[in-house]
Image (cartoon, grey):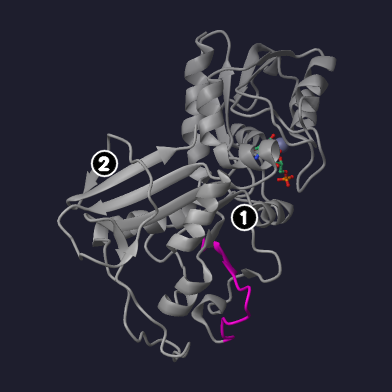
Amino acid sequence: MEYANFIARCIEIARRGEYFVAPNPMVGAVLVRNSDEQVLAEGWHEKYGEGHAEVNCFRHLEMSSYRDVEMSECTLFVSLEPCSHYGKTPPCAKLIIEKGLGRVVVGMLDPNPLVAGKGVQMLREAGIEVVVGMMEQECRELNKRFLCLHEKHRPYVVLKWAQTADGFIDRKRTMDNGQWTKGTHLNSALAISTPETKKLVHKMRAENMAIMVGTNTVLLDNPRLLNTHWEGRNPIRVTLDRHNCIPADARIFSDGIETIVYRDRTDWPYVVSDLAARNIHSILVEGGTTLLEHILQTGIWDEIHVEVAPELTIGDGVKAPQIALPETYEEVDGHRLFVKKNE
Ligand code: AOF
Ligand code: ZN
């Protein structure tokens, strides 16, 4: 039996929960009959607070013609170690033991201290054969945000900006005595993204639990920071306001979505530790340059996404953060999308 293929399938179905399970991990489970390698049932973690992958897999089995299969002659594949704790649902390890499984193949251990090896231990103590570590790198990539929170005790940090060919993220703009009226822009931001790249930005908003911009961006752009062009939820909004100058009617406080404002301590190491304490596993930082440069200086980031408009030059403006871009990029609508990882 080629274990890796079944774990690959677990990863594939786990992704169906992508926009709905945070801060939980995406997990997939596949039940296979040993004698003929027939897949009997599949399940994945579909939504935060609801059934885990294993529970859904057994539920699907019950609804199928295989419901009376001899479990001791089956293997359950799971991309993440089955849980051992009473959380929003009872422990999956207990369920697997009750079902009488013969063998369990686990993609990777769960770093959540509530589990962390205890799930595998429960299974082994019940006499189940357990194989741990299959397609581990792919399993880790799948849940890089969840893993970051539990291993580094901070959210996974994605920095993102768009720039002109000559390296500016915006024209120079000034506040009109710090006054603006709800919904109106005194002098609007330079529009760099195209309809297609804008969609990809909203996809990133859906992938990350939180979104952040600095004070100046809130004051100048008055953004809502919603995800309106992709499936999934709106991210929790985060900003800084050291000098208490963001007005209460700023659009970042609208729409009934949570907004976190840091006023007293605004240094990045503090902000990420506080976000971790709130169980936020990922954050997308969209600017501006002052905030991005502060974050770059701390080294506390994981990915940078830069969109370059190769035919747009403005001569003068707000400089984009100065970083060495990778050699390769993806092209969308004639724009170049660079991804740099902090490795
Ligand atoms: C599994 N299978 O499909 C998932 C697991 O609050 P709860 O009860 O939903 O528990 C969340 C924790 O359970 C999460 O932090 C992670 O450690 C584990 N997730 N475990 O056996 C699953 N999603
Ligand atoms: Zn579980």
Q: Nearer the viewer, residue 150 or 175?
A: 175
Q: Quadrant of ligand 2?
A: top right
Q: Position of residue 83 (x, y in %)?
A: 74, 33
Label 1 residue SS: helix
Q: Is residue 283 left or right of residue 185?
A: right
Label 2 residue SS: strand
Q: Position of residue 317 (x, y in %)?
A: 29, 67
The answer to whether residue 333 is seen in the rendering is yes
Q: Which residues are magenta?
A: 232-248
Camera-side mark, 2 or 1: 1
Q: Residue at 78% across / 35% down in the picture?
A: 113
Q: Position of residue 270 (x, y in %)?
A: 69, 55
Q: Which residue is mark 1?
A: 268
Q: Is residue 138 left or right of residue 256?
A: left
Specify few, some or many for label 2: CA neighbours under 10 Å numbering under 14, 14-19, or 20 or more. few
Residue type, mark 2 in image: Glu
Q: Is residue 86 magenta?
A: no
